[in-house]
Amino acid sequence: MSSQNDSDEVPVNIITKDAPAEPVPCDADSDDMEEPVSQTEPKDDVSEQLVAANKRALDYEEKLKHAMADFQNLERKTRSDIENGVNAKVDGFMLDFLSIYDDFVLARQAFYEGKVNTDGLDSILRNMDSLFKKHHISQIDALGKPFDPNFHEAISIVSDPEIEENIITKEIRKGYISHERVIRPTLVEISKKG
């Protein structure tokens, strides 16, 4: 009889349901076999990628918030600059127009004192007043009020012991406000205790 090594038979391992599978022996010098991959490496790699992607997303979100805030600030500043520019032009025009209005008021007073019919001038002045109202321009009421350098410009002082100090006793020229901005201060006479 021949020995087991001389046999042409290939040894076969039979695996049953109950028996654990035996590892297949491999040649240590074999280049064809890859190293076994740990089951935790793919999970760790995906987790790291997810963390990195979340960090990038948060960075982009933060940059987007800053860009939106910068855009809103620029939009607000641009709108303010445009409004201020338009208001300055309108105020300049209204200052010129107020000089003409003052001339009409003086003409009406002169005609009225000369007993001349002023119906035509009254109608023109009403139209001008409605134009002022339409563009939110109003007169500064100053007579009898305390002097305020933000609204009034004093050009004379009257000594009167019966009136409190710095009270407006006379309006020399009407002042006007447009959208809560003084476009022309009221020229006034103020009191001083003598």
Image (cartoon, rainbow, N blue to C red):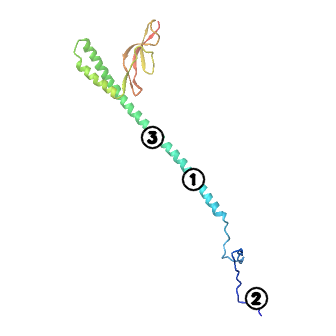
Q: What residue lies at 62% left-to-right and 58% top-to-bottom?
A: 47
Percent across and percent down for residue 118 are 24, 17
Q: Which residue is mark 1?
A: 56
Decide which of 27, 22 is in the foreground and name it: 22
Percent across and percent down for residue 188 are 40, 15
Instruction: Say left or right for 189 vs 34.
Output: left
| Residue 4, label in figure | 2
Q: Earlier in the sequence, mark 3 or mark 1?
A: 1
Q: Which residue is mark 3?
A: 75
* Quadrant (top left, top right, bottom left, bottom right) of the N terminus: bottom right
Relative to 120, say whether 14 is above or below: below
Q: Alpha carbon of mark 3 to alpha carbon of mark 2: how far?
A: 93 Å
Crowding at label 2, few (<14), some or many (≥20) Cα neighbours within 10 Å? Answer: few
Could you tell me which secondary element the residue under label 2 belongs to?
helix
Name the front one of labels 3 and 2.
2
Instruction: Say left or right for 151 vs 32.
Output: left
Could you tell me which secondary element the residue under label 3 belongs to?
helix
